[in-house]
Amino acid sequence: MSIKFKAEKVDVFYNEKQAINNISLNIEKNMITALIGPSGCGKSTFLRCLNRMNDVIDSCKITGNILLDNEDIYGPNIDPVDLRARVGMVFQKPNPFPKTIFENIAYGPRIHGLASNNKELREIVFNSLEKAGLIDEVKDRLDDQATGLSGGQQQRVCIARAIAVSPEVILMDEPCSALDPIATAKIEELMNEISQSYTIVIVTHSMQQAARVSKKTAFFHLGELIEYGDTDKIFTKPKNQKTLDYITGRFG
Amino acid sequence: MFSLPLSFVFIILLCVSLFFYYYSKRTIVEKASSIGKKAKTLPVYYGQNAFLWSFFPACIFLIFLTVSGPNYIDQIFFSKIQDLNPKFNSSFIDLILSKVINVANGKIETDDQKIIVLANDYLSAFEKFYFYRGLGAVLCCALLGLIVTARQKPSVNARDQVQFFMVSIFFISALIAILTTAAIIFSLFFESLRFFNLYNVFDFIFGLHWSPNVAIRTDQVASEGSFGMIPVLLGTLLISFIAMCVAIPIGLYSAIYLAEFAPSKVRDYIKPTLEILAGIPTVVYGYFAALTAAPFLRDIGAFVGLDVSSESALAAGLVMGIMIIPFISSLSDDVIRAVPQSLRDGSMGLGATKAETVYRVIIPAAFPGLVGSILLAVSRAIGETMIVVMAAGLSAKLTVNPLESVTTVTVQIVSLLTGDTEFDNIKTLSAFGLGISLFFFTLILNIIALTVSRRLAENYD
């Protein structure tokens, strides 16, 4: 297995407050890695470092190195806009744009010029919807507003929208926390399918979800990485007492 | 008989109501203990209930009497004079009556004994009225207080009754706001009906010539008036159009800068400044238009060989546009900032730049609100008067050349109604015709604005 992301001694500060403390972590290619931990432990912050979404926040300061395919993503040669095309993101709340379903998916390909004509664009849109398992549900109403879909469908539109840009990595920030169990099951199934071709990093509050979908799990606590390893081992034989306490529900 | 001034009556009412406040509070405790139960709510609510139901109705009664009383007395004296001199016609009686009133108030003096007697009667009638007004209000207050106190039972929830009273007051306030608006529209409507009795509606709406100078007296030499509103309306539209050409791009772009790109420190200064600009009286903008912008444009025109009138639509429109910029900018800024952050994140997360995000996601999402803010500004531009009075002129030309002087609907209304005017001839009445057309014009714009915003509005929770 090759390594996709390599984080080395990453610290993140919001103003004076340290949100992440000295985290080193390797994320492997074409595999699902879950980040778990109690609220405010820095797992979302760490996730947002991976595609430089924290740049938007003025008060946020990041030190340390994060390498994507052995290239420092905070280096001078990297444009965060290009980086985000390679490292896509799906958010906690479904956030489709107030456009039609088709336009939502076509948004990324259009701004990056991935299609040279309408036919190619349609192909990309249909492929993305197919990968997101949504094509049968929406193929007759691609011109309807995406905001009119159900929450689960909206979230899958957002995943299809991320896939349409052909990213190498997809970051998911609690993608199922606003969804009901059936929609959640569909998204998890979808994640399993696409993990063959994409590296996925998912932040989740649900330990069952982490156990179900991920190959590797990292446990964060108070801005520190407590334990990182194969999901099977984390959930059956954790090495650290804090991890054990968390996964058995003693805090968090 | 001693008279009761209004302020004194109010103080008495307050005292009586306060008495019932404490009285109710005490009696409810006694009532409750006599049946061996606790009152349903705290005693203070029973007190409040008694206070509200005694004080406010009495106040309304008092206000009603104060407003209608003098009219009633005048009417009595009118018929009194009529009975004394059955031969007089009503306008002459009016004259005598106003003389009586003026004598009674000591404004003029007279030797006419009849009038002096009447004036004395008038004065004593008023004194009586003041006394009975005060007495009536206080009695009303006391009676209501007694009834409410006596009817209060420990088993009834006085807290709900107090709330019901407050809700009624809120409702009445809202009703007054709506009713006054309706009254204004009705008065405008009926006055304009009088105009349309004198002048054909179609000639008014489609007429191409506006020259409201008609002979007021029969022996006066003047042209036959012509009241076609098209040139006036065209002037309004021309100036509003110029204003919008200035205000929409600058206002929108500054709003985008403020909401999306400005560092928070810059924003903290610019936003209040914009709101101050929006508060400058339009007369001040009028100075600017007449004294600075218009001569400046004329000089430029002369320099490039264009004949710019010293009162030009361009100058008025430009300054009006400047006036409207803060409205558009401030409203649009709020609208743009109301677009949820999650949409920005979503777009950025797909590798869009900030500008792409603004143009492809934020603006479309904020579009309904932006349309609303722009149409609000248009309504303001159309209704704006002072700048145009000072900078655009009075001549109703049928032109779309921005370098000439034009006139607008509001300016015409002002010029038709300033000075001593009698609302009985076609010239002054035509102002109401203009007024109601302006009203309908802005009404339609507002309806469009509302419909567009509602139809396009997305629901983000």
Image (cartoon, rainbow, N blue to C red):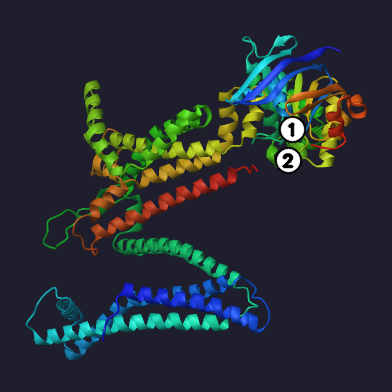
Give the labeled residue for mark 1. Answer: A157
Residue A120 is marked as: none
Mark 2 or mark 1, which is nearer the start of the sequence? Answer: 2
Amino acid under disc 2: Leu
How many angstroms separate mark 1 from mark 2 (CA)?
Answer: 9 Å
Res B120 visible: yes
Quarter of the figure with residue A239: top right
Q: Secondary structure at mark 2?
A: loop
Task: From the viewer's side, name the closer residue of A81 and A52.
Answer: A52
Q: Is residue A108 above or below residue B433?
A: above
Image position, residue A123 (x, y; %): 75, 23
Give the labeled residue for mark 2. Answer: A149
Q: Secondary structure at mark 1?
A: helix
Mark 2 surroundings within 10 Å by alpha-carbon count, few (fewer than 14), some (14 through 19), many (20 or more): some
In screen coordinates, is B205 left or right of B332?
left
Image position, residue A130 (x, y; %): 81, 28
Residue at (76, 20) in percent of width and height: A169
Image position, residue B149 (x, y; %): 54, 81
Q: Is residue A177 above or below residue B157?
A: above
Mark 1 surroundings within 10 Å by alpha-carbon count, few (fewer than 14), some (14 through 19), many (20 or more): many
Quarter of the figure with residue B461: top right
